[in-house]
């Protein structure tokens, strides 16, 4: 579960370059290859039955198209060229197959290229795909020309729609990171201000009893040292967050969120009718303030996700385990993810905020559906001062 800490811009760099995950690329390949084999393979077999000599070559070209789709996510321009040439070859061998059908694989690749590559490149690809319009007109007349151009333009448009959707999701994720950093900055400001205020009081007390009660003065000085180390860690976290100062709360406005108040937080969820189980292992009262706050906010956001997105959830379990130099926070519900619940799929702003909190204190977080049903959020945070 350990992950290297990456800046948000680096985390989104893969999407910005149009890269797909290996699983998504395989799914895209299987789906598009199956479509080509079914939609194009059938008319090729029918048309080839009348001319058995050309059928093997045409089938071989169809298989080449399906195989080339394997690389359409990583090299769509090259795959588009291969599928366009082989599609024209199928049509030349078997004119009974429509040109639109013969170039189906090329149209699919055009859609992928339009979605994942710069607009200028996709426009050039669209223009190239319009070149066979003249043969389409010669073979099918105005109707054949209209069908061919319509399918090509629709393929390109579908890719542009998907591209716009992905850019909107990336913008939402970046905005969520910025807002979460601002919120963290305000909270860390409150923590540091409180720590420094206590240090000032302790320093004054040490000065008052320095001569008469030196041992008490030493205890105060040791407490100042501990507080200074803690404040230094919090300030490092604040510098990492780069959050604005506007709109922050003054210290003492309300009790500071902490794992010590986890039962209060659970009670607010129980009030909605959901059963909440809270289990603790190890001591959490000595955690750095920033880590304690991050853990509390992660549990709070996980509760919010359950209430908003877990359809039918009636039970939530929270486990906080502090051992050695780390604290593990796990929140599991038994609900079902609602259709369209992007937050539960990992793209929502809630999960982005949780991951950002964990990253800024030097920890990591994973979230996703459980094999047996339900949803799990698991964070691993350091149990020592941020540095």
Image: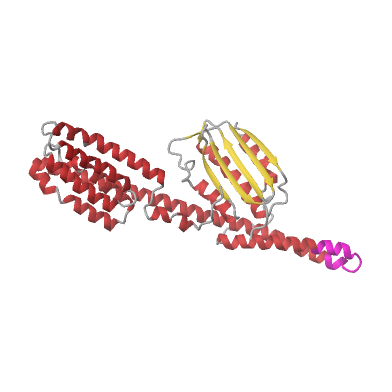
Residue drawn at (81%, 62%), measured in percent from left and top? 220
Residue found 53% across the figure and 33% down from its top: 335
Q: Residue furthest right?
A: 212
Depth check: give the residue in front, 386 or 305: 386
Queried whether the magenta region covers residue 241, the answer comes back as no
Is the residue 133 above or below the residue 276 in the image? below
x then y, percent, for residue 288: 68, 54
- x and y percentages locating residue 230 in the rendered image: 70, 60
**Span colored in magenta:** 206-221
**Residue 311 position within the rendered picture, expressed as x and y whole percent measured from the top left:** 50, 33
| Residue at 21%, 37% in the rendered image | 40
Q: Is residue 199 left or right of residue 41?
A: right
Q: Quadrant of the C terminus?
A: bottom right
The number of numbered discs placed on residues in the rendered structure image is 0
Nearest the viewer among 276 and 201 is 276
Pick whichever, 81 or 5, lies toward us. 81
Magenta highlight: main SS: helix
Q: Is residue 196 visible?
A: no
User: What residue is rendered at 10% in x and 46% in y?
Assistant: 135
Q: Mark yes or no: residue 84 visible.
A: yes
Q: Is residue 214 magenta?
A: yes
| Colour option used | secondary structure
Tell me which corner region of the image, top left, top right, bottom left or bottom right, holds residue 33.
top left
Q: Is residue 53 left or right of residue 306?
A: left
Position of residue 188 measured from the top left corner of the image (x, y, whole percent):
63, 57
Image height of 300 relative to 42, above or below = below
The residue lying toward the viewer, choosing from 90 and 304, is 90
């Amino acid at each position: 579960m350990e992950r290297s800490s990456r800046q948000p811009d680096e985390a989104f760099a893969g999407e910005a370059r149009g890269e797909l995950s290996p699983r998504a690329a395989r799914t895209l390949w299987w789906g598009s290859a199956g479509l080509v084999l079914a939609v194009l393979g059938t008319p090729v077999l029918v048309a080839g039955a009348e001319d058995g000599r050309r059928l093997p070559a045409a089938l071989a070209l169809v298989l080449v198209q399906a195989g080339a789709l394997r690389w359409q996510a990583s090299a769509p321009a090259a795959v588009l060229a291969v599928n366009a040439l082989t599609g024209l070859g199928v049509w030349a061998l078997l004119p009974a197959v429509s040109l639109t059908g013969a170039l189906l694989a090329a149209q699919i690749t055009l859609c992928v290229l339009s979605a994942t590559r710069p607009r200028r490149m996709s426009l050039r690809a669209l223009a190239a795909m319009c070149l066979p319009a003249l043969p389409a007109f010669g073979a099918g007349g105005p109707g054949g020309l209209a069908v061919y151009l319509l399918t090509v333009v629709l393929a390109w448009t579908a890719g542009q729609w998907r591209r716009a959707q992905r850019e909107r999701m990336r913008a939402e994720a970046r905005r969520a990171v910025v807002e979460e950093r601002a919120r963290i900055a305000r909270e860390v400001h409150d923590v540091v201000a409180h720590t420094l205020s206590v240090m000032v009081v302790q320093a004054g007390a040490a000065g008052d009893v320095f001569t008469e009660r030196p041992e008490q003065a030493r205890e105060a000085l040791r407490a100042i040292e501990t507080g200074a180390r803690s404040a230094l860690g919090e300030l490092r976290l604040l510098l990492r967050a780069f959050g604005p100062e506007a709109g922050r709360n003054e210290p003492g406005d309300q009790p500071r969120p902490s794992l010590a108040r986890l039962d209060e937080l659970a009670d607010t969820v129980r009030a909605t009718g959901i059963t909440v189980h809270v289990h603790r292992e190890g001591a959490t009262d000595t955690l750095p303030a920033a880590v304690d706050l991050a853990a509390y906010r992660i549990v709070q956001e996980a509760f919010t996700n359950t209430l908003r997105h877990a359809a039918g959830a009636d039970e939530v379990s929270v486990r906080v385990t502090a051992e050695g130099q780390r604290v593990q926070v796990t929140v599991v519900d038994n609900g079902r993810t609602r259709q369209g619940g992007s937050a539960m799929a990992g793209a929502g702003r809630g999960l982005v905020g949780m991951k950002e909190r964990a990253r800024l204190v030097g920890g990591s977080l994973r979230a996703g559906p459980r094999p047996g049903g339900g949803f799990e959020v698991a964070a691993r945070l350091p149990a020592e001062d941020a540095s």
